[in-house]
């Protein structure tokens, strides 16, 4: 007999202190590093791009962009050229406390931390399966997965996945560094083990 998990209840019982506001982003970056490894790419060919979205960014003129570090961060987009959301990885995503990455220290809790700090997560992934390029997209919030689509990719494309962490709750905004250099330093510190290993880390750009 299978056991049903209540996502809202699981979130309620998951702890993320405001002082650990960066951990949801750390989880997304480490997931990208693992995805690049799973794609069989040498780290030097791997790429992780982190886009920072701030409050009222849409109203900023080009001349005031340099001052935008004064604005609170409300969202992140993390894009990598890794293996993507194949059927196997999607099944793992749908299983709370998944053992899929146990050998790499994964506890299957990263997406729960996302929802502790962000209102919702959107995912768009282009991946290759059985020699066919496919596209998968969906939204993820406290109610679960919604608007999931899966289709073949007919145009020329490369494998890439974008995770958008959207709607950072105000209680976490004040504990999220505003300066890009501080964000970079904290990501580097958290991912230091990947940088000092012999094969190195992928290219990570904010």
Image: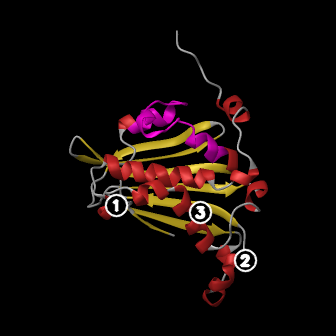
Marker count (numbered)? 3
Residue at position x 57%, y 67% in the image:
185
In this picture, residue 185 sits left or right of residue 54: left
Q: Position of residue 164 (x, y in %)?
A: 55, 56
- Which residue carries the number 3 mark? 186
Which label's residue is closer to the chain start, 3 or 1?
Answer: 1
Counting other residues with Cα less than 10 Å from the Cα at mark 3, is it few (<14), some (14-19), or many (20 or more)? some
Q: Which mark is residue 148?
A: none
Magenta part of the chain = 89-115
Check disc 1 and report its element: helix, strand or loop: loop
- Which residue carries the number 2 mark? 70
Marks 3 & 2, CB-CB < 8 Å contact = no
Counting other residues with Cα less than 10 Å from the Cα at mark 1, is it few (<14), some (14-19), or many (20 or more)? many
Which label's residue is closer to the chain start, 3 or 2?
Answer: 2
Mark 3 or mark 1, whichever is nearer to me: 3
Residue sitting nearer the eye, 185 or 161? 185
Which label's residue is closer to the chain start, 2 or 1?
Answer: 1
Residue at position x 30%, y 63% in the image:
45
User: From mark 2 to mark 1, how far is it between C-alphas?
Assistant: 31 Å
Q: Position of residue 72 (x, y in %)?
A: 72, 68
User: From mark 3 to mark 1, how far is it between C-alphas?
Assistant: 20 Å
């Amino acid at each position: 007999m299978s056991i049903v998990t209540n996502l809202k209840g699981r979130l309620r019982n998951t702890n993320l202190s405001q002082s650990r506001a960066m951990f949801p982003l750390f989880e997304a970056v480490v997931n990208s590093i693992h995805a690049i490894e799973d794609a069989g790419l040498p780290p030097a060919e791997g790429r992780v791009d982190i886009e920072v979205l701030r409050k009222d960014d849409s109203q900023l003129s080009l001349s005031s962009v340099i001052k935008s570090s004064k604005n609170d961060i409300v969202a992140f987009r993390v894009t990598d050229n890794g293996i993507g959301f194949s059927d196997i990885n999607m099944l793992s995503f749908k299983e709370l406390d998944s053992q899929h990455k146990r050998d790499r220290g994964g506890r299957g809790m990263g997406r729960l931390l996302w929802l502790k700090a962000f209102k919702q997560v959107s995912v768009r992934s282009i991946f290759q399966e059985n020699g066919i390029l496919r596209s998968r997209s969906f939204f993820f919030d406290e109610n679960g997965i919604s608007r999931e689509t899966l289709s073949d990719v007919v145009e020329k494309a490369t494998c890439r996945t974008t995770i958008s962490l959207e709607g950072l709750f105000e209680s976490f905004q004040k504990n999220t560094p505003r300066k890009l250099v501080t964000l970079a330093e904290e990501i580097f510190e958290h991912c230091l083990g990947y940088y000092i290993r012999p094969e190195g880390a992928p290219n990570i750009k904010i």
